[in-house]
Amino acid sequence: MTIPSKYDARLVEDKWYNYWIQHNYFHSTPDEREPYTIVIPPPNVTGVLHMGHMLNNTIQDVLIRRARLLGKNACWVPGTDHASIATEAKVVAKLKEQGIKKTDLTREEFLQHAFDWKNEYGGIILEQLKKLGASCDWERTAFTMDPEMSESVIKVFVDLYNKGLIYRGYRMVNWDPEAKTTLSDEEVIYEEKQGNLYYLQYKIEDSEETLTIATTRPETIFGDTAICINPNDERFTHLKGKKAIVPLCNRVIPIIEDEYVDIEFGTGCLKVTPAHDENDKVLGDKHNLEVIDIFNDDASLNSYGLHYQGKDRFVARKEIAKELEEKGILLKTEQHTNKVGTSERTKAVIEPRLSDQWFLKMTDLVKPAIDAVLGDDTEINLVPKKFENTYRHWMENIRDWNISRQLWWGQQIPAYYFGDGKEDFVVAENIEDALVLAQEKTKNYSLTTNDLTQDEDALDTWFSSWLWPMSVFDGIRNPENEEIKYYYPTNDLVTGPDILFFWVARMIIAGYEYKGEKPFQNVYLTGLVRDKQRRKMSKSLGNSPDALKLIEEFGADGVRVGLLLSAPAGNDILFDEELCQQGKGFANKIWNAFRLIKGWEIDESLAQPETAKIGLAWYEAKFQKALAEIEDHFSKYRLSDALMTIYKLIMDDFSSWLLEIVKPAYQQPIDRNTFNAVIEILENNLKVLHPFMPFLTEEIWQHIKERSPEEALIIAKYPKIKEFNQQIITDFDFATAVVSGLRTVRKEKNISFKNTIELFIIDAEENAKEFDTVIQKLTNTSTINYVAEKVDGASFRVKSNEYFVPISAANIDVEAEVKKLNAELKRAEGFLFGIQKKLSNERFVSNAPEKVIALERKKEADTLAKIETIKSSLKSLK
């Protein structure tokens, strides 16, 4: 194959990706090898590739490709999550554009629209991941609402219900009025927001007296069912046993007493609205208060809101405050900062709401998951360990999980109602089983499936994805199948810390409940991708680059390198496109090095030079040292450091040093032994680099020689770690310092590389003389002489050795050197003029401290000496 002069990622990437797919390298089936398994954090079916996905999946691909090279049976399972809230919102919006309301459709009709949408738009992100080089086992692609996945979810629900862990409860929940569904506590984000505190006057029944209440939500007065005072508050003793009148609706409510009221906060009186505040609900239950829900499911006011019926809560708040002010009920308004819960998905302000919901008891389920991460015999490692504290806080303060959602897109809760009572239901995997249970429960054997109605709610999305490491291998439906026994537990999970509780912790809980063991060994938590100004990347800020355009501009390998160079484990990534440019530049450097090697002509009769033997021995030791470092970095999930070790090895040691040592003289051939050794070294470099830059490395690998599909780089054998000679590395470092010193002399003295130089050394310490031939070749030094006395000429030191290079008109560019020395002389004379002018100023000399004057006189003496040296050098050149 002819080798193109430039590396063009666009021509290479599709070619090799298709080749890998064609030869089924990504596919895994159980065999005698050690398995290495990763399950993808399933992106939302609505998703498109963004920088977070790029980072997360690059890391997974690096791990899976390396495992493949290490001879393991690597299995990376891809898939998508149905993302109930996000997807349903998109489908509803699309239907709205077509003039169709969700309420006009049956559940089955709506689900058909949703699946049509999923089939058209869903999974785009998986296709985009292929552009990145993701080597997933695409034959295993799963979707959380695939029939077998849904069956697993339903099976688990029924099992947990039968164990007494799932129950139906009328509870205060987090209501998202935009998505019109409940959310679990973990899906609510609390943000500090500036609002108002409204001071309202409530009249006392049959009295001219009033009491003042402070509230942040005047619209909820329609739901007030009591006023509460602290029994120990002497200010309100006279109100005990009396009743108050709610403004606007004029409903009479009792004044109750409870020590829950904070005497110091607000006015010391509390309005109690059990339907719209969790703490008020507790008070209401304790005092048997009426519960009045004033909101519709979209958070507009219902008929209890009187003339505000149908108005949005925030619109109503302003209008009610205005009416209260006009009627003299609103005494004053103060600015007030409080924490407001918002929906993680829709960003809508959450409304506390009483509702019949399904809950999962977590107190006992969570115990094995706490021990697995935080116990004495840790079974699961969180990387970095700093996240253990977050994990502990969440898990030790866990509450029952609200698992029902008022949505259609998702697994429908398998509860079947046969009567009007709240307990008139049975739970079963299908309607046929439900009928048998219902007949037994009612003793009414004439019941038919027509008498059963399935619960309308769907399950929380996380209730399906918490089974992911098991359900992708059919481990719930068929717990003893070959695949679950082979691939489970999986090895590494790579994800973001933002879903440590939502997903990671719950998978651990499910793993111990259904397999009796951990679902994975290590959890690698990546950081957030931020811009150079440390801002989180987002569409709204316009600071998130188009992932596919980056790949188009810099190549997938360039982008992968750019991301990983800036991605230390667990820390936020400050992404800069310059790093992708650096990655692209790295690819070009490797390509050019390869072209240089392949351009050498081989002479079979040539003996191997001593310089090549030494250089190759040194690089073998250097490579083995780097290999050990890379292994250590991988064991600690320091992928950024592993890549940097490889980067320096190839850029510095291989390209800048080894190739210079072994390359033949201009238009001269190379010996066969050296050429073969360099090719072997290049191949080993490609093997360690392949997980990071798969396309470039496969392209070069296939260009080195003709290979069969069984010899492709993707399934080559990773280099083995061996003992190495540290002394040769130390000696070479010394030699490179000498080379750098000689190159500096050439540069400063304008000695062309074409002209040979002599080197004299006063050898104060034991020098590695075997590298002298290498030094000579790299610096075009004719002879190296070890002497006892100093020699005239340019000099430098390396440690305690002194080096001298005689300078003569014969070995330098006289004209260039004279020009340079004259420029130096002019600068030195100008500097001297300034110092002498200062020292001739009597005022300066008499007022300046002695130290300052002494320093100026030293500068004068040094400059005079420098001028003499320059003049002497100029004289010697004439």
Image (cartoon, rainbow, N blue to C red):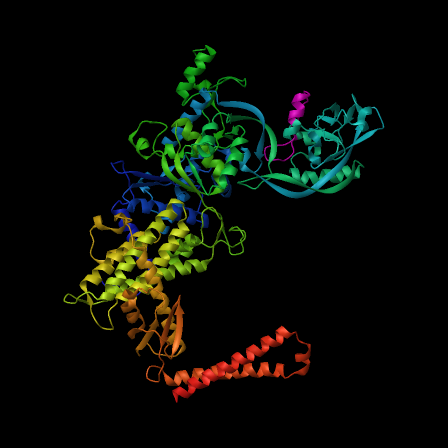
Residue in the foreground of this view, choosing between 517 and 841: 841
Q: Residue placed farthest to the right in the image? A: 208
Q: Quadrant of the C terminus?
A: bottom left
Q: Which quadrant would residue 702 be assigned to in this image?
A: bottom left
Percent x, y for residue 523? 42, 40
The answer to whether residue 574 is above or below residue 219 is below
Q: Residue placed farthest to the bottom in the image? A: 878
Q: Quadrant of the N terminus?
A: bottom left
Percent x, y for residue 79? 38, 40
What is the count of numbered marks?
0
Percent x, y for residue 817? 40, 83
Residue in the foreground of this view, choosing between 649 and 418: 649
Q: Residue placed farthest to the front in the image? A: 788
Res 355 seen here: yes
Res 7 seen here: no
Q: Residue at x 40, y 23 (%)?
A: 430
- Drawn side of residue 788 relative to residue 412, left or right: left
- Drawn side of residue 505 relative to residue 632, left or right: right
Percent x, y for residue 424? 51, 17
Q: Residue at x 20, y 53 (%)?
A: 707
Q: Which residues are magenta?
A: 281-302
Q: Which quadrant would residue 244 be assigned to in this image?
A: top right
Residue in the foreground of this view, choosing between 723 and 688: 723
Please check the rendered image and state whether residue 299 is part of the magenta-colored stretch, yes or no.
yes
Q: Residue placed farthest to the left in the image? A: 605
Magenta residues: mostly which secondary structure?
loop
Please check the rendered image and state whether residue 339 is part of the magenta-colored stretch, yes or no.
no
- Drawn side of residue 532 relative to residue 691, left or right: right
Residue in the foreground of this view, choosing between 817 and 352: 817
